[in-house]
Amino acid sequence: MSWHNRAKRFLFELYQEYSRRIQSIHMDNETTSKQNSLTLYFVIAFLIPIIASTFITLRDGLSPTLAVTDISALTLVVIMTMVHAPTIAALVASFRDQGFKGIKELFRQLKFWKFTPGWYAKALFIFPVTMVGTLLILSFFSLNYAPVLNLTVLTFGTLISAFWEELGWTGYATPRMLVKSTPLKVGLILGLIHAIWHLPASFWGSSVFHGELFLINFLVASVGIVILRIVTVWIYSKTKSVVLGWITHASFTTGQLLFVSLAFTSRETVIWQTMFMGSLTLVVLFILAKNWDLMKRKVLI
């Protein structure tokens, strides 16, 4: 090989190495930027309900009754502020990522809704059926636990509130976390974050009612939030659908307000929540047994 060809080969290899390094730096910067945006999402999503709950608590004190049984103007302020926080956070973080294109991409995910009836059945019925089944079992020991039918404005309002939450949790946070983690790990981590996110509003709206049982009730209810997120991430990893995530969340929240008595005492609430979480744990174990890929990183992203 002549010195001329050797020089050309050397320069070509040098160029290739330079290109690889530039691409690696670009990818590292892009990854860091996305991680920073995800952190920004969580900070905003947490700050909004914390500020709202703290302001109302300092101004008017804690809710003297269980907030969901006494829909006052203050209750509506806390609920509306809280449920819109994930969407506001997602809009800000998406704009930071890609400007208005990022916001468009966030809402573009809503077009994925054409799926087999089986996926809609899973999203709609997993939680309500488990709820009613658990209540029926408990009703053998006390009729106080018998399923009811609460047709209230708040019950139907949760259908809308779940949408605004899931646009953030499923539409923004979930796909970004799935890039580096398995669906099960994302469900556990995001579920824990989602559960803690409820603390400010839960403390304002139920700490007086539950008294010394507040912490126990919150911890048990948090298990349900983690399970909700595991199921939602599982469905998203299979379908890439924010719409199904919204339906899953709505069935969880609306189902409890629809079928569970609002007249439970604090002790009865803890018993109900504990039994319900036990039932949901069995449901999740069944899902894991049928879907081992939840522990792998092969997802639709």
Image (tube, rainbow, N blue to C red):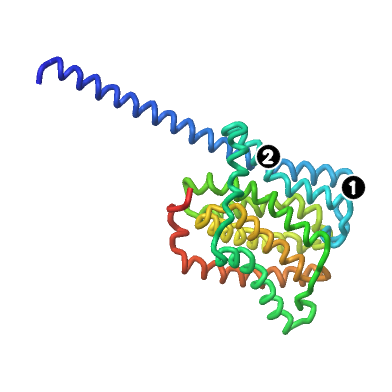
Work out whether residue 237 can be spotted: yes
**Which residue is rendered at x = 63% and y = 69% of the image?**
125
Amino acid type, mark 1: Asp
Judging by the rendered image, the residue that carries numbered circle 1 is 60
Amino acid type, mark 2: Ile
Work out whether residue 184 can be spotted: no
Residue 177 image label? none
Q: Front-most of 151 and 261?
A: 151
Q: Front-most of 244 and 220?
A: 244
**Which residue is rendered at x = 10% and y = 17% of the image?**
2
Q: Position of residue 265 (x, y in %)?
A: 81, 70
Q: Front-most of 144 and 234?
A: 234
Q: Front-most of 89 and 195?
A: 89
| Apparent side of residue 22 relative to residue 180 in the rendered image (left or right) | left
**Which residue is rendered at x = 63% and y = 40% of the image?**
41
Q: Which of the 4 image quarters holds residue 6?
A: top left
Residue ranking furthest to the bottom? 140
Element class at badge 2: helix
Q: Which of the 4 image quarters holds residue 292?
A: bottom left
Q: Position of residue 149 (x, y in %)?
A: 79, 72
Judging by the rendered image, the residue that carries numbered circle 2 is 44
Q: Position of residue 120 (x, y in %)?
A: 60, 64
Of labels 2 and 1, earlier in sequence is: 2
Few, some or many C-alpha atoms within 10 Å of disc 1 (few <14, some 14-19, many ≥20)? Answer: few
Residue ranking furthest to the top? 4
Image quadrant in which the N terminus is located: top left
Quote the CA–CA distance across marks 2 and 1: 24 Å
Few, some or many C-alpha atoms within 10 Å of disc 2 (few <14, some 14-19, many ≥20)? Answer: some
| Apparent side of residue 44 relative to residue 57 in the rendered image (left or right) | left
| Apparent side of residue 236 relative to residue 43 in the rendered image (left or right) | left
